[in-house]
Amino acid sequence: MTVTVTDAETDVLVIGGGGTGVGIARDLAMRGVSVTLVERNGLGQGTSGRSHGLLHSGARYAESDPEGARECVPENRILKDIAGECIRDSGGYFVQVAGDDPAYFDEKLEACRKVGIDAEVRSGDAARRTVPALSAAVERVMEVPDGSIYPSRLVAATAASAHACGATIRPHVGVTDIHTDGDRVTGATIEDTSVGGTSASGGNEERIDAEHVVNATGAWAGRLGELAGLDIEMQPAKGVMVAIDVDGLDRVLNRCREPDDGDIVIPHEDQVVLGTTSVPVNDPEAYDRADWEVERVIEECASMLPNLRGRDPARTYWGVRPLYEPNDAEREQRGISRGFF
Ligand SMILES: Cc1cc2nc3c(=O)[nH]c(=O)nc-3n(C[C@H](O)[C@H](O)[C@H](O)COP(=O)(O)OP(=O)(O)OC[C@H]3O[C@@H](n4cnc5c(N)ncnc54)[C@H](O)[C@@H]3O)c2cc1C
């Protein structure tokens, strides 16, 4: 039998301990708001710890989403300023390989400059002097201030900072019910999800009352919404990342073409992480992890770095994008916005 044992109160209850949740908790705590964050797993174990780790300069979406790209410029600067230990400020190249549409390159260059992203064109030979492993088929590159970010480190540091400012951070605590008074959300029922936690042994639950409840559950936002009787039309999409032992790459590489499978290479310490795919899934946890995704990503990235061909992955992992798209017609498209709603 489950018993509700403790009543706690907070101004704001944040549900979800990924980048979004810990960032919100830190911001509120810095403003003196009483805030409690609960995360049913470890911090950053959702999508945040499974992302590619590209610190966007904004160039990737400059022509398709200029507003989002413009936001990246100060975000990139602020993150380098306040979280430099979580970033490798490598810079990046958008790479045009023989056969890629040169008009796309020119359009991106113009769009970058329009939104204020530093972008300089270099010849293929100049780029190969910096990155000798680049393919001979690389015709030209656009140098932009992309970088690598270590998301787990950033989530941990942000949570520690939130805690230092007075936030209560509770990993391994999941929300099992949302309370409403008919019109508004008033709190939640939580349970311990740690190994040996009380719920696992059929034990106690807690009730937390809150003035405001923030749903920061990413790809799970629809499921949490259901607990409050809300319909949030999430369209989660999985993507694979492939880590390969390669030392010495010191630039982020993006293939300069319409976003597609296998067009990004990110240097992470003594590995590079290749990605990714974008395949709609119905369930953000139970989905197929397909070999074709791994093979395709290696093959495509090898168009930029031929020495990747035939290499065994050191590690593969999948993440699920928290995409929101109320229009079902968009479901199959890579074009679902990465913006905020
Ligand atoms: C393949 C892939 C590659 C990506 N690459 C990049 C990149 O290179 N650069 C970039 O900037 N972005 C990238 N992204 C996007 C980025 O990772 C996400 O936008 C970001 O991590 C979302 O963070 P979040 O906090 O909203 O979600 P999450 O990190 O998923 O956090 C949500 C948390 O809510 C928790 N939760 C769910 N239900 C409950 C509950 N009932 N009770 C308590 N907790 C609950 C989950 O356990 C989870 O930890 C990528 C995404 C994917 C999938």
Image (spheres, helix red, strand yellow):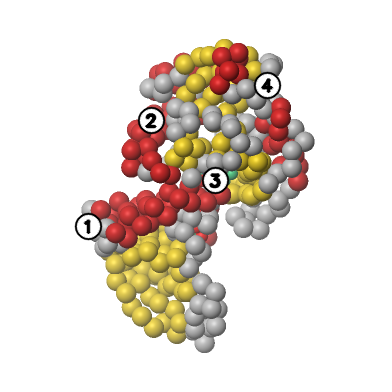
Q: Residues within 10 Å of mark 1 (few under 14, many from 20)?
A: few
Task: Judge by depth and name the residue closer to the eye, 285 or 76.
Answer: 76
Q: Earlier in the sequence, mark 1 or mark 3?
A: 1
Q: Residue furthest left?
A: 32
Determine the image quadrant of residue 189.
bottom left
Q: Residues within 10 Å of mark 4 (few under 14, many from 20)?
A: some
User: Gap in Å between the C-alphas at discs 1 and 4?
Assistant: 53 Å
For numbered disc 4, what is the local secondary structure? loop
Residue type pointed to by label 1: Gly
> Can residue 201 be seen by looking at this rendering?
yes
Q: Position of residue 220 (x, y in %)?
A: 52, 56
Q: Which residue is mark 2?
A: 73
Q: Position of residue 226 (x, y in %)?
A: 50, 62
Q: Residues within 10 Å of mark 2 (few under 14, many from 20)?
A: some
Q: Quadrant of the C terminus?
A: top left
Q: Earlier in the sequence, mark 3 or mark 4?
A: 3
